[in-house]
Amino acid sequence: MPAQLGHVVNGRIVLDDPVDLPDGIRVRVADYEIVEDALDEGERAARERALTRGLVEADAGHLIDADEVLAELAR
């Protein structure tokens, strides 16, 4: 499922679009402020797809240890 946008109303998270999720499913919520950027709609959509793919891979355990990445960058 792609990332969903929403907002907070009276301390509760309200998604902008309806989503049909089963009761009890775990969800990940991260707060961030949407800022204006120079991306067009196609670039924004590509960015959202890339971020969603990254979250799916992380959730599946396909991660690289940060020390390995830093060691590779230092070479």
Image (cartoon, rainbow, N blue to C red):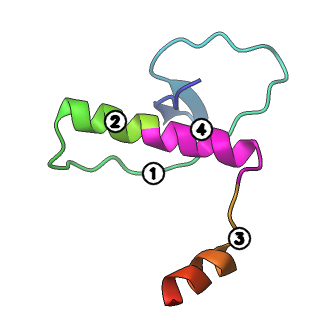
**68 to 3, vertically: above or below:** below
What is the secondary structure assignment of the residue under circle 2? helix
What is the secondary structure assignment of the residue under circle 3? loop
Rendering coords of residue 15 (x, y %) = 52, 24
Q: For label 4, count other residues whose C-alpha is less than 10 Å away and answer few (under 14), some (14-19) or many (20+).
A: few
Q: Name the residue under label 4.
A: 11
Q: Which amino acid, by three-letter code, is at mark 2?
A: Ala
From the viewer's perspective, is 9 left or right of 58? left
From the viewer's perspective, is 59 left or right of 31? right
Distance, label 1 to label 4, CA atoms, is: 15 Å
Say if mark 2 contacts mark 4, CB within 8 Å: no
What is the secondary structure assignment of the residue under circle 4? loop
Q: Which of marks 4 and 3 is nearer the N terminus?
A: 4
29 inside magenta stretch: no
Q: Mark 2 points at which residue?
A: 46
Closer to the eye: label 1 or 3: 3
Q: Mark 1 points at which residue?
A: 32
Stretch in magenta: 50-62
Instruction: Answer with the quarter of the image where residue 21 lies.
Output: top right
Q: Which amino acid, by three-letter code, is at mark 4?
A: Gly
Q: Mark 3 points at which residue?
A: 65
Say if mark 1 contacts mark 3, CB within 8 Å: no
55 inside magenta stretch: yes
Rendering coords of residue 33 (x, y %) = 38, 51
